[in-house]
Image: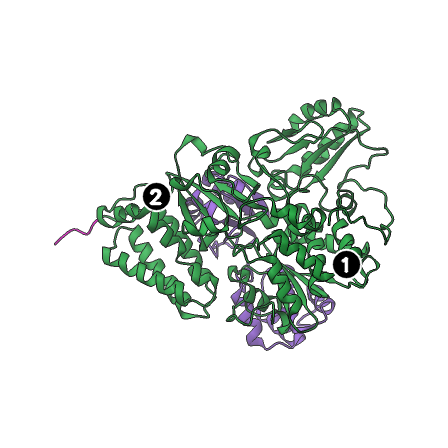
Chain colours: A purple, B green
Amino acid sequence: MPSDDKRWRIVETRMRRLGSRPDALIEVLHSAQEAFGFLDDDALRFVSDSLRVPPSKVFGVATFYHHFTLKPHGEHTCVVCTGTACYINGADEILSSIKAGLDVKPRETTADGKLSLLTARCLGACSLAPVATVDGAVEGRVSSSDLVAKLAGL
Amino acid sequence: MSESAPSAPPAPPKRPRRAADGLRPLEGPARASAYVCEAVSCLSAQSHDILLKLGEQVSGAGLKDVEVKRVGCLLLCASGPLVQIPGTGQLFSNVRPDDLDAIVEALADVTPGEQRAPEAPFFSRQRRIATENSGRIDPESLDDYVEKGGFEALRSVLTSMTPAQVREEITRSGLRGRGGAGYPTGLKWNTVAKAVGSPKYVICNADEGDPGAFMDRSVLESDPYRVIEGMAIAAYAVGASEGYVYCRAEYPLAVSRLRKAIHSAGRAGYLGLHILDSKLGFEVDVRLGAGAFVCGEETALIASVQGGRGTPTTRPPYPAVAGLWDQPTLINNVETFANIAPIIRKGGAWFAGIGTSTSKGTKVFALAGRVVNTGLIEVQMGTTLREIVFDIGGGIVDGRAFKAVQTGGPSGGCIPAEFLDMGVDYESLVGVGSFMGSGGMIVMDETSCMVDVARYFMDFCREESCGKCAPCRVGTTQLWILLDRISHGGATLDDLAQMERLGAMVQRTSLCGLGQGAPNPIFSTLRYFRDEYLAHIVDRVCPAGVCAIEPAPVPV
């Protein structure tokens, strides 16, 4: 294990439960990201060694899928859905107000490290469009001013 | 096969009924019930608090014979949190904690034994097969599912049908793949059954990537056992021993309910070795996607289940012959599996009697966009768009004019008002330049610009292209650049002609469905809304007022 951080245990247990087979790669990356919030070099190398998958393949998989991130997120995360229903109900305007109000673009973190802004392809809550999540809690029918105020107050 | 009474083996022993999270179980039978929706939309509107508070108020009012129950999706997602009283058919929407008195009062006068459906057209025009249990059972309770006839179909298949008979019944039903392409399910099952190789696999495709589609999420959140039952029947019919559900990581609630369901079905003997004491052994595991749209394509999905990057491969060989680990693999969509148990219970002929001549049964659509009643609907194939948008959907918000309905996600198209009276089935949608897709239906009004919509979908495809083949990787980016230029008013008519040529090339030469379908939004909007493109190019105005047209360059 890369360090004595207890979270590595979680990842290792998950690997063992999946038989440490190379095809468990995506599942294991999920649990590593869940434990640490992002995937750093140590994590990728540890997974690569344990599953006997070449580091190039681990890196390839980690960068292919949008869900995995190699950079740490800010303290809080806001995900704005840009699915079709949200798009025609003004998701773009929400993103530009956040940009104007908090100076952060999608896939970036504010300079003070407080907030990361992400976009999602579709959160599947189209009836509530436009939708955003703040630290995992779904907010339906958001108005851009309310959301910006909420994010600024975090 | 509806009548085949399950003889042996005996039903598993009945465990005491457990009530929904945090509520005390009832001592006797319930005289009346209140169903509280706990699917994602309502949960995000704090429906769980409503459930707990309603439970408290009901016991506070001394109603000892009233059951408050968590259920799956009550369909009218836009008006959550939803509470339904099945005894009277009353549906309470946008429930706030202060409204609970009215619900408790209504519960006090329910006549026992009666069941009524809500009368609003949103509900009465629907025909529910795949979602019949949605909003009627507690999705996390195996007992509830079994009580509503769950696993009866699996039992009758195992005790009184041969695998060939099961496949014949599915073929007779005329069921076609609900993932979008509409390949006949019976034919696919036969191909896998005849393919040589062991073990065989069954995969349930729950990677619902189309933006604006949430049918699979809702089915998995509301009735996960039904999908498992469908998969087990499929495993028996094709001779498979292992199964996977490939589900999007964006649906955490669906994943957790599915995992719980697999676990409790295994403990009750509906999965695992010797299912219901028969020779069938079938294990199911969940595999999470990680946010790649292309993984909905079956060969890319297989690559992802094997732990690699989700890049598609050329077909043939089809997964039915050489799929997961090069073994014969059956891949069906969530909704397809959800239709299996009712077909076995009521017979293929019954199912074939519903729908149109080429498309049988019902289809679940996710109705969203600029329509009053957004939510989940299940209608008979052949229902007209007008019925869906105006009767069930309640028309356009703010009384605006209907402009188009978009189906089929990024591979689909926009259907204009002139086809509102067209019945919806696989063929009719293709005929008007769209596509069934997984069932997202986005209604647009005059505030939507069709050039902008095409640009939005091309941006989607451009980002989601896996990069393996050049026509898709390069073509979608070039098409997006052209669309972007048009929407900013900087394009010429030559650009438009170039875009049409390039689109046709991308369509013909891409490796998988993502690239082949990517130009469809352009072609369908050009077919019906060419004047909007011309307005952007020639007159440099956006009729809907959406696009930011740059000022014309000043001649020097």
Which residue is located at x 57 percent, y 45 percent?
A: B364
Instruction: Tell me which chain the residue with mark 1 is part of.
Output: B
Q: In this view of the protein, can residue B206 be seen by the observer?
A: no
Q: Nearer the viewer, residue B507 or B320?
A: B320
Residue B386 sits inside the magenta stretch: no
Residue A69 drawn above or below residue B68: below
Left or right for A16, reference A119: right
Q: Nearer the viewer, residue B70 or B192?
A: B192
| Mark number displayed over residue B546 | 2
Instruction: Tell me which chain the residue with mark 2 is part of.
Output: B
Residue range highlighted in magenta: B552-556
- Of all residues shown, which one is farthest toward the left? B556
The image position of residue A28, as x and y in percent, is 65, 66
Quadrant position of residue B485: bottom left
Residue B35 drawn above or below residue B323: above
Q: Of the residues shown, which amino acid type is indicated by label 1?
A: Leu
The image position of residue B463, as x and y in percent, is 44, 60
Quadrant position of residue B444: top left
The image position of residue B505, as x and y in percent, is 36, 65
Residue beneath disc 1: B271
Left or right for B58, reference A31: right
Quarter of the picture containing the C terminus of chain B is bottom left
Structural crowding at the residue carrying mark 1, measured as other residues with C-alpha within 10 Å and reported as few (<14), some (14–19) or many (≥20) = many
Quadrant position of residue B381: top right
Identify the main secondary structure in magenta.
Answer: loop
Q: CA distance from mark 2 to mark 1?
A: 53 Å
Q: Nearer the viewer, residue A148 or B551?
A: B551
